[in-house]
Amino acid sequence: MLTVNFFDIGSLDCSEAIALFDSPLTLPETLADEVRVMARRARYGRGSTYHPGWTSRFHWRLSRRPRFIPASLLGGTIAVNVFLIDPQLELTRVRRLQALTEGLPNLAIFPLRAAVDAENGFSFRRLYLTRSGDPLGSSLFPGKHNVDPRSFHQVPCIGITDIFRSIEAACSLRNGACNILRINAEGAEYGIMKALSAAGYLGAIGLFMGAGHDLRKIDAALYEEYLRFLAQHEITFIEFKASDRAKTLRAACSVEQHVRQAIDRMGDTGQGMATA
């Protein structure tokens, strides 16, 4: 059995994780999101990256598309560990994912309401809130363009390598597991990836999904260095924006394709992996 570890850092509403199993939005949530999109469109005009109708299409596609990962779980081909890590994690959405474990064998959901940083150890950090009050976009960086440096919460923060080291043996991280990393850390992605590289974990990541636009706005030169780092390490990189539903759909499809390929490789070698 193949172990699949899906790390969703900066998950907040768990959309990418839920998209692997079901539509991340119910019909009422879809309608509410469309209203929000139209309000942002009216406020920002053509400059808005939110587009009316995209949410409805996104919901329709994901709620009707065949679900490869649940089928593989039911067939006993894979075991999936989903790590949801965000200091503002929406617990109602976590419970929705956890409810799936009752019908899907070998699916485990691990929520952690904490920020992730490149530095080792446990600490409390300031999470700066957006000027609009929307939890989406809050950041550890006071210089991020849309946050108020005078408005923040103290949140627990843990080093990424501490997380990986604590689950390494149980989840076969460096022993053939299919490891997928998704980060939306509002500009902290580069530091997290460098920390994983220094600790020797970067080579175990088979697929990486990350947002880079926030780092580009904070420090354009550092963003270019980040892209060079990814290229030098030959990291498969899918960039997404939470406001771009089409990219979220493609990311979910990419995860499924990556797991399919890992299953095929397992079949070719004739080796089974231990579950977590």
Image (tube, rainbow, N blue to C red):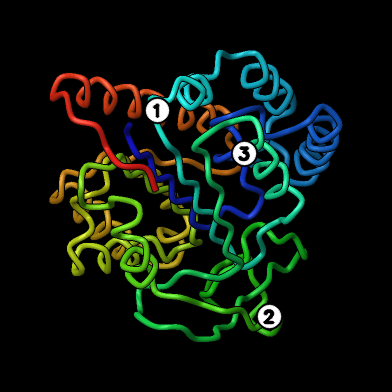
On the image, which quarter does residue 79 sit in? Answer: top left
Residue 145 spot, x, y in % from top left: 57, 67
Q: Secondary structure at mark 3?
A: loop
Q: Earlier in the sequence, mark 1 or mark 3?
A: 3
So how many labels did they put on this image? 3
Q: Which mark is residue 46?
A: none
Say which residue appears at 36% left-offset and 68% top-offset.
166
Residue topped by disc 1:
254
Q: Secondary structure at mark 1?
A: helix
On the image, which quarter does residue 17 sit in? Answer: top right
Residue topped by disc 3:
101
Mark 1: few, some, or many residues within 10 Å (few <14, many ≥20)?
some
Q: Amino acid at mark 1?
A: Ser
Residue topped by disc 2:
153
Up/down of 167 relative to 126, above or below = above
Q: Is residue 227 left or right of residue 78?
A: left
